[in-house]
Image (cartoon, rainbow, N blue to C red):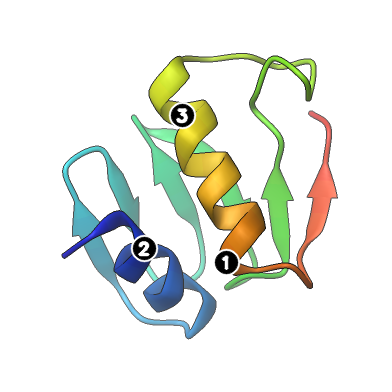
Amino acid sequence: MTNQNVIKAWAAGRTGGSGNLVTDGVKLYSYNLLIGSGSGATIFDHTSGGGSFYSQTTSCHVGLAKRLIPYAEVIRP
């Protein structure tokens, strides 16, 4: 499953995973760090610009989620 498909599955309430990006259908995790909740409702901005940098890969996961789910509320943790 691609990262894009994992994020789409999360937004649709389905489970999925691809390496270090996984979802149980409600929550979205990057390297076991919660980056999304509510099946596409909320994205936690764990990027350097969001003030809560974790890793470059996590930043890419968050950025992809923000692009694919533009209606999500983005929260700076």
Quadrant of the image occupied by residue 7? bottom left
Label 3: which residue? 58
> Which residue type does callout 3 highlight?
Thr
**As rendered, which of 23 and 61 lies closer to the eye?**
61
User: In screen coordinates, is 44 left or right of 39?
Assistant: right
Q: Position of residue 45 (x, y in %)?
A: 71, 35
**As rendered, which of 2 and 10 lies closer to the eye?**
2
**As rendered, which of 68 and 14 lies closer to the eye?**
68
> Which residue type does callout 1 highlight?
Leu
Q: Position of residue 59 (x, y in %)?
A: 53, 28
Q: Residue furthest bottom?
A: 12
Q: Position of residue 34 (x, y in %)?
A: 53, 40
User: What mark, if any, has residue 4 been given in the picture?
Assistant: 2
Q: Secondary structure at mark 3?
A: helix
Spatial CA distance of label 1 from label 2 is 8 Å
Above or below for 44 versus 74: above
Above or below for 71 versus 7: below
Q: Earlier in the sequence, mark 1 or mark 2?
A: 2
User: What mark, if any, has residue 68 been given in the picture?
Assistant: 1
Spatial CA distance of label 3 from label 1 is 15 Å
Q: Are marks 1 and 2 in contact (CB under 8 Å)?
A: yes
Mark 1, other Cα within 10 Å: few <14 / some 14–19 / many ≥20: some
Q: Nearer the viewer, mark 3 or mark 1?
A: 1
Quadrant of the image occupied by residue 57? top left
| Residue at point 33%, 64% (across, down) | 6
Q: Secondary structure at mark 2?
A: helix
Spatial CA distance of label 3 from label 2 is 14 Å
